[in-house]
Image (cartoon, rainbow, N blue to C red):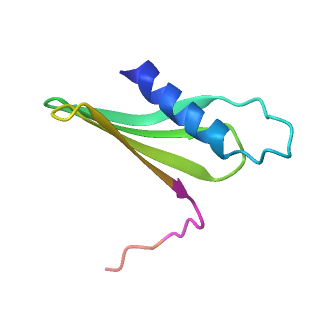
């Protein structure tokens, strides 16, 4: 399952690269994964400096994968209020 998840995200990234640029060398890696019953959930990213991360879900009942692609815009610290 892990290899399939990495392959899906790599192919998605390659399909969405700017075709006028030289193809960059990059790796896809898992940040987190979880299995609940027959379903899998993955959070993945790549070594590209594009701020993207990917949520990949496998629905074991339907034998389908769902891919959400996100861009990180900001990381804000919210202090705890007492």
Residue 1, placed above or below residue 52: above
Q: Position of residue 69 (x, y in %)?
A: 50, 52
The C terminus lies in quadrant: bottom left
Q: Residue furthest bottom?
A: 82
- Residue 42 is drawn in which quadrant? top left
Residue at the location (37% across, 73% down)? 80
- Is residue 4 or residue 63 the one in the foreground? 63
Counting from the top left corner in percent of width and height, residue 43 is at 43, 41
Residue 41: percent from the left, percent from the top? 31, 38
Q: Residue at x 58, y 31 (%)?
A: 28
x%, y% of residue 72?
A: 57, 60
Residue occupying image coordinates x 44% and y 73%: 79
| Residue 26 placement, left or right of 40 | right
Q: Could you tell me what secondary structure mostly forms the magenta stretch?
A: loop
Image quarter hosting the N terminus: top left
- Which residue occupies 59% across, 51% down? 52
Left or right of residue 80: residue 22: right
Q: Is 64 in front, or is 48? A: 64
Q: As drawn, is 58 to the left or to the right of 29?
A: left
Q: Which stretch appears magenta?
A: 70-77
Q: Is residue 75 magenta?
A: yes
Q: Quadrant of residue 3?
A: top left
Query: Is residue 14 in the magenta section?
Result: no
């Amino acid at each position: 399952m892990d290899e399939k998840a990495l392959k899906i995200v790599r192919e998605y990234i390659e399909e969405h690269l700017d075709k006028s640029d030289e193809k960059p060398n990059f790796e896809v890696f898992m940040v987190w994964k979880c299995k609940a019953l027959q379903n899998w959930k993955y959070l993945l990213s790549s070594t590209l400096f594009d701020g993207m991360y990917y949520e990949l879900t496998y629905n074991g009942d339907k034998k389908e994968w769902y891919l959400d692609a996100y861009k990180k815009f900001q990381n804000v610290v919210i202090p705890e209020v007492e």
